[in-house]
Amino acid sequence: MPAAEALHPLGEVELAVSGMTCASCVARVERKLNRLDGVAATVNLPLESAHVVLSADVADQDLVDAVESAGYEARVTRRRSANGAAGDGAGPGAEESAG
Ligand code: 9UX
């Protein structure tokens, strides 16, 4: 488990990730996501998803871009704020918009 979960979570994001077929794909996606400041990501290969814990205000699009830069496709399926007020800068009103 990432130690960053113990830091100050602002919220959590669930991503649907497609195109991963092996453990190396998973490692690649995780590395790209975890390179973002304030992101602690865990990728699930069988579920084709990524669970992201945010300790900084990171926009959905930044997470999607990171996955796409690794060569895979991503879509935000869920965003949850830890304190109900975080995420203003990321546009919580757009959370249900399709990718
Ligand atoms: Mo292994 Mo994943 O060649 O693309 S890294 S399938």
Image (cartoon, rainbow, N blue to C red):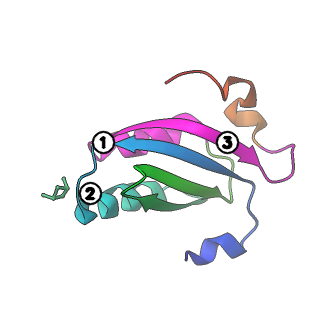
What is the tally of numbered marks visible in this picture? 3
- The residue range painted magenta reads 59-86
The mark nearer the N terminus, 2 or 1, is 2
Q: Is residue 64 magenta?
A: yes
Callout 1: SS: loop
Q: Quadrant of ligand 1?
A: bottom left
Residue 39 in view here: yes
The residue type indicated by label 3 comes to Arg
In this rendering, the answer to whether 28 lies above or below 71 is below
User: Image height check: is 42 above or below 77?
Assistant: below
Residue 17 falls in image quadrant: top left
Please name the amino acid that badge 2 sits on: Cys
Residue indicated by mark 2: 25
What crowding class fits label 3: few (fewer than 14 Cα within 10 Å), some (14-19), or many (20 or more)?
some
**Taking the image as drawn, is residue 35 in sight?**
no
Where residue 80 appears, as percent x and y from the top left, is 73, 45
Q: Position of residue 10 (x, y in %)?
A: 75, 55
Q: Earlier in the sequence, mark 2 or mark 3?
A: 2
Asked if disc 2 and disc 1 are in contact, CB closer than 8 Å, the reply is yes
Q: Amino acid at mark 1?
A: Tyr
Tell me what residue is drawn at x 29 percent, y 47 percent: 70
Q: Is mark 2 within 8 Å of ligand 1?
A: yes
Q: CA distance from mark 3 to mark 1?
A: 20 Å
Tell me: 16 left or right of 93. Answer: left
Query: Mark number for residue 72?
Result: 1
Q: Which residue is mark 3?
A: 79
